[in-house]
Amino acid sequence: MSSNTPSLEQFAARKLEGLERRHLRRRLVVSDNQPSMKTVRDGRLLTNFCSNDYLGMAHDPAVIAAAQAATERYGAGSGASRLVSGGHPLLFELEARLAAVKGSEDCIVFGSGYLANLAITPALAGPGDLILIDELAHACLHSGAKLSGAETLVFRHNDMTDLEAKLAKHRTTARHTLILTDGVFSMDGDIAPLPQLNRLAEQFDAWLLVDDAHGLGVTGDGQGTAHAFTPPSRAALQMGTLSKALGSYGGYLCASRNVCELLRTRARPLVFTTALPPSAIAGALKALELIEADQERCARPTVLARRFARACGLPEPASPIVPVIIGEEADALAASTALQEAGFLVTAIRPPTVPRGTARLRITFSAAHSESDVDALADQVAPMLNALEAVS
Ligand SMILES: Cc1ncc(COP(=O)(O)O)c(C=O)c1O
């Protein structure tokens, strides 16, 4: 056993006490995930309404078989960074397929979506450059901006007037400017106004990076948020993840050949890390194939989200993500516990994942849910919403 260092122990214990007091401590709980969005927690079978496995790909027999076959053929791990000897053929195949889906010249696959965002912004921006980021953009876009060392300004959520004013005021003094946003916002489920963002990017010679982690597979006929618009509104930098609707693990950037080539040489989270295991790549490839063949499956999570929203009197969602804003952290935790007692897993989302005062239930829908699962959840959530309304 390693020896304890008193000052370190005191530091950790004091921090934990403070987090506990403010209802902000988080705990890891064993979740034994099963097909059909079921999960076992503390010996109880629950219906999972907080997974990002929007299409049920993680337990799809064809995806599992592809992952197993890749393990047999290429091994359990990649053995090295892609730039050393970890570049197995499936990675190149996946990159070509993602580039085709996203309508880009090229694509690079990273170890995760989080790593992709730690890679992209710091490779393209530094001191002397400017980053404008939506206030509700995902934590890893914010982390990438911070890591880059560029000046970073936050614009109000989806507020194109605020963004334009900031561009007009600050663009000319910056060497290069990046605009960072989610495509589908992870905690709210709404969609960024991509045509306006692309227009502003062009007008001010700024580079638009759209994180479409929650768009691929479920918006724009499965091709992602860019395709939710007519004509499609593609950003210069289209980033996403393999870990949500594709049911696997990994991240990607679709962009021009030159940009991707630059990142292959300069992006530290690509250069200095081991390539993804073959099973993850093969699973993602198979999931992409299934998505292209089955539009109904792609539409179903949002159809179910709308069914739920209607039953609860909530605004119509644009994606499979439905936020139920509770407010205080303790109340969100209590609502989550009540749902768990009723047989549903909906983890409470608290700051800093969401702004203070907006602790919530983030309810996500999957093609693998049944209509009766959704209706049973609505039966529990609707009275909670009525009670919230009564006290507000
Ligand atoms: C918008 C967004 N971007 C990026 C990520 C990170 O992706 P990954 O889970 O593949 O690291 C997430 C996942 O939590 C996300 O919601």
Image: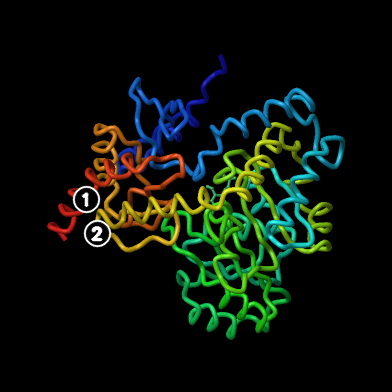
Q: Residue at x 17, y 58 (%)?
A: 389
Say whether residue 269 is left or right of residue 15: right
Which amino acid type corresponds to the residue marked 1 in the rendered image? Ala
Q: Amino acid at mark 2?
A: Gly
The spot of residue 31 in percent (x, y) is: 44, 28
Locate residue 54, reporting x and y percent.
Answer: 49, 45
- x%, y% of residue 293? 62, 48
Q: Which residue is pictured at 62% across the width and 60% down the height?
A: 145
Q: Which mark is residue 313?
A: 2
Compared with 116, 180 (above or below) is below
Instruction: Give residue 324's mark.
Output: none
Foreground pick, 314 / 290: 290
Q: How many marks?
A: 2
14 on left or right of 195: left
Looking at this view, name the residue that lies furthest to the top.
1
Q: Are the residues at dot 2 and dot 1 in contact (C-beta closer than 8 Å)?
A: yes
Q: Is residue 106 left or right of residue 323?
A: right
Choose top left, top right, bottom left or bottom right for residue 13. Answer: top left
Using the numbered discs, state the Cα–Cα distance from disc 2 to disc 1 in whole angstroms.
8 Å
The residue positioned 49% from the left and 79% from the top of the image is 162
Which numbered dot is residue 382? Answer: 1
Q: Residue 278 at what x, y percent from top left? A: 73, 33
Residues packed near mark 2 inside 10 Å, few (<14), some (14 to 19) or many (20 plus):
few
Asked which quadrant contains residue 194, the reply is bottom right
